[in-house]
Image (cartoon, rainbow, N blue to C red):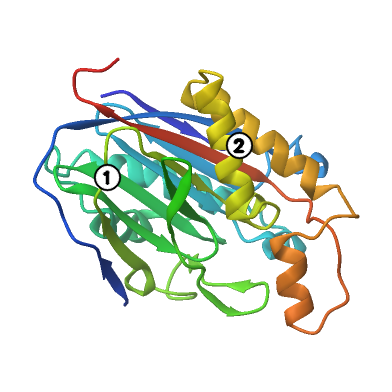
Amino acid sequence: MICHLMGVLRMNGLQVYLAIPNKKSFRLVSGSCYLPHPAKEETGGEDAHFICANDEAIGVADGGGGWVEVGVDAGEFARELMCNSVAAIQDEPKGSIDPARVLEKAHSSTKSQGSSTACIIALTEEGIHAINLGDSGFIVVRDGCTVYHSPVQQHGFNFTYQLESGDGGDLPSSGQVFKIPVLSGDVIIAGTDGLFDNLYNNEITAAVVHGLRAGFNPQLMAKQIATLARERAVDKNRQTPFAKAAQDAGFRYYGGKLDDITVVVSYIAGSSNT
């Protein structure tokens, strides 16, 4: 097993199904970039993520920042949730990982105080199988176009669905489940709200197209996208998805939103590709 768990380790029910094509053999080749909020670099920020190369699964989580007000490390829950997700994946059938089951097990095993969004994606014989709860998420880019974008789950503006320790918060069963067919050459971009609050889909897609033309591997692609998101986050003169949502909710807001930024990029490659 080769798994990389990031997000600064300090040991470290709606279901969506798209038409499924004939089974094909693909591989998920992934890389990531994490940029903590500048004010939270010493503590590692509040995002966490993992890449399981052998099991062809990825995940991202964003710890609820409000916990810091009561003296709780807001990232600890997210880090433990992702760590437990990696452990749960090891109990899944090879090539048939059920992300919803993984998230259920991970949540029940997570004891840290706090809360977090969660997005887990696995490559199966039928395509990608994913669950998303909250305002983290993913898009699928094919031939220079966004062919899928997971919807955001919010109770209200800036009030996202979150898993919480114990019986509080939303349940894993509230997450949206997706089964999406993929083709060789597709690019999956998963991220926390630090990505999607600051970049529109077309901006992410343009960065993907540029990166592919430049021959970027997933790691370089993730770094390029995360860097662009950070540039937008500190730009007060450009409209962003977060600013638009704030305006729609009746707030006067313009520009980006400075936050932790996690980007995981996965290339769908033929099984014989390296």
**Going 79% across and 49% down the picture, which residue do you hit?**
233
- Please give the name of the residue rendered at 85% of the width and 47% of the height, measured from the top-left corner: 234
Mark number displayed over residue 182: 1
- The percent coordinates of residue 168 (x first, y second) are 48, 75
Dot 2 amino acid type: Ala
Q: Amino acid at mark 1?
A: Val
Quadrant in the rendering for residue 89: top left
Return the residue at label 2. Answer: 207
Q: Is residue 151 visible?
A: yes
Relative image position of residue 273 (x, y in whole percent): 26, 17
The local secondary structure at tag 1 comes to: loop
Q: Closest to the observer: 184 or 9?
A: 184
Mark 2 lies on a secondary structure that is helix
Q: Residue furthest left?
A: 22
Residue 73 visible: no
Q: Toward the viewer: 100 or 63?
A: 100
